[in-house]
Image (cartoon, grey):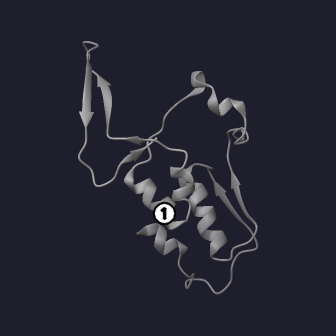
Amino acid sequence: GVARAALGEDRTHGKKPASCVIVGGGPTGLACAIALARRGWTNVQVWERLLRPPASDSKEWGDPSRSYNVGLSGRGQSVLRDIGALDTVLDKCAVVKGRMDWGPDGEPKERLANKTYDTQV
């Protein structure tokens, strides 16, 4: 896919820039920074407007009142696999086979999906 191509050898430029700024520290920005670094680019900076997340050993991560599950779809899993990070991320995830939605009447409606991948949260 696209991530594999980005991680490949850079044949388009003979000279790499002295520095590079990526605006946005979300999944796409971070994957881009990793891909550029693996191509040998140095001095790659990621600018993000939000504060840095707490350290991975912070008690904040275990606080259920701060929990917000974000699904990791097949496309996201593919990119993480391409950059060699999927197994590390999956160690911290749980499998989700479907989701629960609520209709206008407040009644729950379970939605199961037949996909070629398991969503991870």
Camera-nearest residue between 7 and 19: 7
| In the image: residue 102, left or right of residue 10 | left
Q: Which residue is found at the position 58% from the left and 62% from the top?
A: 32
Residue, disc 1: 81
Other-residue count near label 1 (Cα within 10 Å), few / some / many at <14 / 14–19 / ≥20: some
Camera-nearest residue between 39 and 118: 118
Q: Which residue is found at the position 55% from the left and 28% from the top?
A: 67
Labels in figure, total: 1
Q: Which residue is found at the position 48% from the left and 67% from the top?
A: 3
Q: Position of residue 75 (x, y in %)?
A: 40, 56
Dot 1: element: helix
Q: Position of residue 47 (x, y in %)?
A: 69, 51
What amino acid type should be assigned to the residue bearing mark 1? Arg
| Residue at the limit of the structure toward the top, as seen here | 105
Q: Position of residue 88 (x, y in %)?
A: 57, 55
Q: Does residue 26 sit above or below 64 in this rendering?
A: below
Q: Does residue 24 sit above or below 69 in this rendering?
A: below
Q: Position of residue 11 (x, y in %)?
A: 55, 85
> Which quadrant is home to the N terminus?
bottom left
Q: Which residue is found at the position 29% from the left and 13% from the top?
A: 106
| In the image: residue 36, left or right of residue 100 | right
Q: Does residue 106 sit above or below 100 in this rendering?
A: above
Camera-nearest residue between 117 and 19: 117
